[in-house]
Image (cartoon, coloured by chain):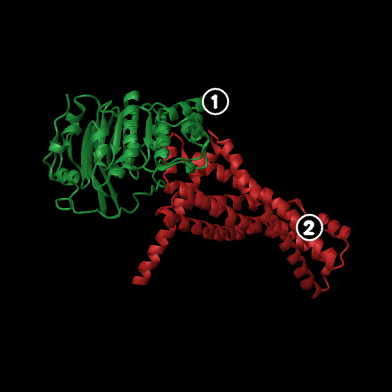
Amino acid sequence: MTPEPQTVQPSPPTPTATATRGLTPKLHLQGVTKTFGARRVLDGVDIAVAPGRSLVIIGASGQGKSVTLKIAVGLMRPDQGQVMVDGEDVTGMDASDRARRSPRFGMLFQGAALFDSMRVWENVAFRLVIADKTPKREAKDRAIEALGRVGLTPEFAGLYPGELSGGMQKRVGLARAVVAHPDILFFDEPTTGLDPITSDVINNLIIEEVKRLGCTAISITHDMTSARKIGDEIAMLHGGRIVWRGDAKTIDDAENAYVRQFINGVAEGPITGDAGPVRGASRRPRVGAG
Amino acid sequence: MNAVRAIGRSTLDLVRSAGAVAIFAGRGIGAAVSPPFFLRQLRRQVWMIGYTSLPAVGLTAVFTGAALALNIYTGGGRFNAEQIMPQIVALGITRELGPVLAALMLAGRVSAAIAAEIGAMRATEQIDALQTLSVDPYRYTIAPRLTAAVLALPLLTVVADIIGIAGGWLVSTATLNFNGQVYVHNTWSFLTSGDVTSGLIKAAVFGFIVALMGCYHGFFASGGARGVGRATTNAVVSAYILVFASDYVMTSLLR
């Protein structure tokens, strides 16, 4: 049973209730707003993801996809609204506090965000050693095992991230995200900057790992091939709101004008180019935020 | 009216920045004095900040001590007071020049390096990655640098004091016909423990300032490579200014 695609245009209510089919959502963003300077980037985002489901958020550049993900992870705080995990309000917690709790978070960053002063295996084992206090020998074994699952042989374990290609760095980033068995996985533009074949490899690895761990996945991308492949559901973010949400298989039949324009990649339509710079979105002024 | 508005805006910006730095420093200190401690990171930073700064600090100190000796000899000669030169050199080095010069070397070398390193970590989302890996970036990146600088700069200052006085001794015995043993005796008998400890207290505060400026500007760097460059410049300039300002305050208090 899959949720019916719903068009929400131009305003809420958004289809969060149907999307979780009566279950307590694993992750639920309720009425989230975020403003940078004079520009309101998120204007009441309301989105829920059921346990074990993979949701992909698509949208044009500058529409707030990254901000939504950062708020969901805890790297940024919303001006208004709540972030709920398993029904518990975690809005006030930062990412390191959220990651420490159960359910566990894991995240694959757009540029992999590997620590360049550490070897590949140390990157993968970082959380195990530093946060979970796993003995170093055991952590190294688990890191090498995780690297093997993403197609990297033990010879790569001793290299530094700078010695790897972009695709390999993404694999390492994925191994690092999954090595501690997270319950919720976040993917930030997982295939951006990769060639189509490497992108497909990464997509397949994401599907395999999400399935193996049985976790909930939230991805943001504007790569429709990736969105169709890794998502059970797709939601489209535009103008600071979710304007459409439905089963990934049904997106090509969607009648929503924003979705039509986006998936067809045409200039003509209601989406009128980049929304412009978001001052402060890449920077997190934690000072003063508690 | 515009001038009043500009002054008001600048004042508000200054107060806002001071508040942000104070809160950042508070979080950094809190992380530095409470567990968990990342001792491997601390060791690495002590090595980076302390040991690798030794050549620069040592060379600066020897030349400063030598130049100071020459200047005091010339100035003292106008009052027939050349013989007090060793005492003045020792006092000047231990109370003022040792800690200040070591701090300035550190500000130029280490503050810039810290800002660039943490700024690059911010630009490449490594700081965010730390958080998603359940690690508080204040504990892992900020606290070890603050602690290392507070520990390393007094040690560097001891080295600067010794080498600076040795520089004065060298130029005095080699070119000004001072007796080496008498020079050492005069220096040793004149210096008090207060002269040395006041310099070391200053050094610890300077170390904190230098590391704090590097960490703060790097942590909040934005705008890619240009932003990292701007953070590096701001870190060095603000560290220099704060070192001199705090030097005056501490000199007043530690007289």
Question: Vertically, is A29 above or below B95?
Answer: above
Q: Amino acid at mark 2?
A: Ala
Question: Which mark, residue B174?
Answer: none
SS for callout 2: helix
Residue A73 in which image quadrant: top left
Along the line of sight, the residue nearer the viewer: A100 or A5: A5
**Can I make out residue A133 in this image?**
no
- Badge 1 crowding class, 10 Å Cα cut-off, few under 14, some 14 to 19, many 20 or more, is few
Camera-nearest label, 1 or 2: 1
Q: Chain of mark 2?
A: B
* Colour of the chain lettered A: green
Foreground pick, A155 / B14: A155
Q: Is residue B57 above or below residue A16?
A: below
Q: Is residue A156 left or right of residue A218?
A: right
**Chain holding disc 1:** A
Residue B199: % across, % down: 68, 54
Residue highlighted by disc 1: A137
**Colour in which chain B is shown?**
red
Instruction: Specify whether A246 is left or right of A73.
Output: left
- Farthest residue toward the bottom? B78
- The percent position of residue B198, horizontal first and vertical second, equals 68, 53
Q: Are marks 1 and 2 on the same chain?
A: no
Where's residue B154, x and y in %? 66, 49
- Disc 1 element: helix
- Amino acid identity at mark 1: Arg
Mark yes or no: residue B26 visible.
Answer: yes
Residue at the spot x=58%, y=36% of the render?
Answer: B39
Bin the neighbour count of mark 2 within 10 Å (Cα to Cα): few under 14, some 14-19, many 20 and up. many
The x and y percentages for residue A241 are: 20, 43
Q: Quadrant of the N terminus of chain B?
A: bottom left
Mark 2 highlights which residue? B166
